[in-house]
Image: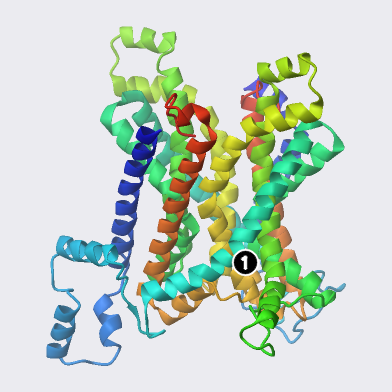
Amino acid sequence: MRSFASRFARQRAGVAAALFVLLLIGIAIVMPLAGLGDADRISNDVLIAPSQAHLLGTDDLGRDVLVDLLRGVQVSLFVGFTAAAAASVLGIVIGATSGHYGGLADLAVMRLAEIFQVIPSFILAAVLVALSGPGLMRVVTVIALLAWPQVARVTRGEVLRVTHLDYVDAVRCLGYRESYILFAEVIPNAIAPALAVSTLIVGQAILLEASLAFFGLSSVDIVSWGRMLNSGQRFLFNAWWLSFFPGVAIFCTVLAFNLLGDAIGATLDPKGKR
Amino acid sequence: MWRYLLARLAWALPIVATIVVISFLIIRIVPGDPLQALVGDFPAPPDYIAQVRHQFGLDAAIPVQLWRYAAAVAHGNLGFSFANRQPVLELVLARARLTLLLMVPALTIASMLGVVMAVSAAMRAGSALDAGITALSLFGYSVPIFWLGQLMVMLFAVRLGWLPAAGMISLRTSPSGWAALASVLWHMVLPALSITIYYVAVVARIARASVLAVLSEDFILTALAKGLSHREVVWRHVLPNAIIPVVTVIGYHFAYSLTGAILVETVFAWPGLGNLFIVSITNRDYPVLQGILLVSAFMVVLVNLATDLLYAFLDPRIRRGYAPRHA
C-alpha cells in the first residue's frame, strides 16, 4: 500500500485530480449544512450577468447560478459514486465467478456482457427513464446495469491469471471450498484493475446523468448541472452564463475522474508507461 | 475467412433477439397500464375497455404477446404513431436518415484527422505536439457533447453571427434545388463540427496507442535497419498495421457516436432522431420510443457486422483463415 501511494504521488495529473475530487466531496458535505440552498429561493434579480453580487450571474427566476452550481455537486457525486459502486460489485462478483469456474456459464456471461456493450446505453437509459419517470435511484440503477460488463471483463481476465498461481493451488491443497478460495484468496488479489475501471465509470455515470437531465429526463425539484444546461438552452442568445458555467463544472468533474482513473491504472501497471 | 464471417453473423443473431426482448419488456416492466394510454383518462365503459384490450392483444399471455411482437418486428411493423399519424418504422427511418446525414461526414473527417494526428503525435512521443494531442483526447472524453454544441452556438452564431444557430434549412429558401442544398450544408456546419471535435479525440487516443504499439515491433526496427526512410516506414509498415485496430474501434464506437449525434441535434434543433425522441417523450408516444431504441440498436449491430467484414478484409491473417480472433 505504501509503495502504491508513493508511486501514485509521482502521477502529477492524478494527484491534482484527487485533490479536486476531495474538494468536491467537501462541497457536497458542506452545502446542505451551510443552509444556503433552498431550491426555490427565487428573487426579482432575473438574468443578471456575472457581477460582484452574483459572481456567476442569476437565472430566469433570479436564482444565483453559483449557489445552484455548488448544490449540483451533490447530485453528480451521488449518481457517480453509487452507480460506479453498484456496477463494480456486480461486475467483480460476476466477472470473478465466471472466470474462476469457467465452462458454459462463463461463456454465457461473457456473451451477455458483449450484448450490453453493443446496445446504445444512452438511448436505452433514456427510454427507461422516459417510461418509468425521473428519479435519481432509477438513473443510478440503469447506469449500473449498463456499466457492469466493463468491470466484469477486466476482473475476469485478472481472475483467470490469479487462479492459476501457485499460492492458490497451495490453499486448494489445504482443502478449502472453492467458493472460499474465490472470495478470500482470489478476488482480493484480482481486484486492482477493476479499481481503475470503476473510477472511469464514475465519470461516465456523471456524464450520462447530465445527458439525461439535459434531455429533460430529471426531476424538476432537484438542482443538477444537466438540468441547468437544459434550462440554459432557451437563453443561449441572451444569457451565456446559464450554459457556460454548469458545462465547465461537468467537464472539470468528469475530467478529474478520468485523470484519476488513468493515474490509478498507470500506478498499478508500471510497465505500461503512458 | 468464411468461417470467421459466419461466426460473426451467428454472434449477431442472439444480440438482435435480446434487443427485441428488451424492447418488448420495457413497456411491461414500467409502472402504468398501456390500456390507460389507449383508452385515455376519461371514465370509459367496461365493455369498451374489454374491447380495446382484446383489439390490441393485451388479453393474451405474456409469451404470446412477445411472440406476436417479435413476429411484427420481423415484418417491419413497429406500430403506429398516433401523434404523427404515421407508421413508426417509416417515421424513425426518415429521421434516422437525417441523423446519419450529420454523422457520416463528421465521422469520416474525424477518423482521418484523428489518424493523422495520432501518427504525428506517436512519431514524436513526448513532444509538445504529442502532449497537445493527448490533452485534446482527454478533453473529448470528458466534455459533455451537448455543451460543446452550446458553446459553438454562443461563439459562432450569437457572438460572431457567422453561422445559423438552429434548424436544417432557412425558411426563406425554396425547399428544393441548389439554394436549398447550400442552406442545408450551411446549417450542418456547426452540429457536424461539434460531433467531429468530440470524435477526433476518441480516434486520436486509440490510434496513438495503436501506432505506438506497432512502432515497438521488431519489423519496424528491421525496416529502419535496412535503410528505409522514416516516411516509407510510416506509410508502408506502421500505418497498415496500426489502422486495423483503429478501424474496429471506429466501428465499435458507433453506438457512442450515435448517442453524441442525438444529443447534439437537440441543441441545434436538427430534425433527426434526437429531436423525434424529445418530442415523443413529451407526447408519451411509447411506440416511437421503442422504435428509436430498436432501429438504433439494429443500426449498431449492422455497423459492427460491417466492421467485422472490413476487419477481415484488411487483416490478411483472417482473410486467409489464420488466427480467427476478434478484437
Which residue is rendered at x = 68% and y = 87% of the image? B173
Q: Where is residue A133 in the image (x, y as percent from the top left)?
A: 42, 70
Which chain letter goes with mark 1?
A: B
Which residue is rendered at x = 46% and y = 41% of the image? B308
The quadrant the N terminus of chain B occupies is top left
**Residue B257 is at least partly visible in this image:** yes
Q: In which quarter of the image is residue B326?
A: top left
Its colouring scheme is rainbow
Residue in the foreground of this view, choosing between B1 and A167? B1
Residue in the foreground of this view, choosing between A184 and B157? B157
User: In the displayed structure, does residue A58 sit left or right of residue B16?
Assistant: right
Q: Quadrant of residue B215?
A: top right
User: In the displayed structure, does residue B296 sit left or right of residue B106?
Assistant: left
Which residue is rendered at x = 51% and y = 46% of the image? B252
Q: Number of marks in the image?
A: 1
Crowdedness of circle 1 by 10 Å Cα count: few (<14), some, many (20+)? many
Q: Where is residue A198 in the image (x, y as percent from the top left)?
A: 54, 40
Q: Where is residue B210 in the image (x, y as percent from the top left)?
A: 64, 33
Residue in the foreground of this view, choosing between A255 and B83? B83
User: In the displayed structure, does residue B319 sit left or right of residue A50?
Assistant: left
Task: Identify whether B55 is placed above or below A109.
Answer: below
Q: Position of residue A252 (x, y in %)?
A: 71, 53
Residue of label 1: B264
**Residue B125 is at least partly visible in this image:** no
Task: Identify whether A81 is placed above or below A139.
Answer: above
Task: Identify whether B24 is placed above or below A156.
Answer: below
For mark 1, give the secondary structure: helix
Check disc 1 and give the amino acid type.
Val
Task: Identify whether B175 is placed above or below A222.
Answer: below
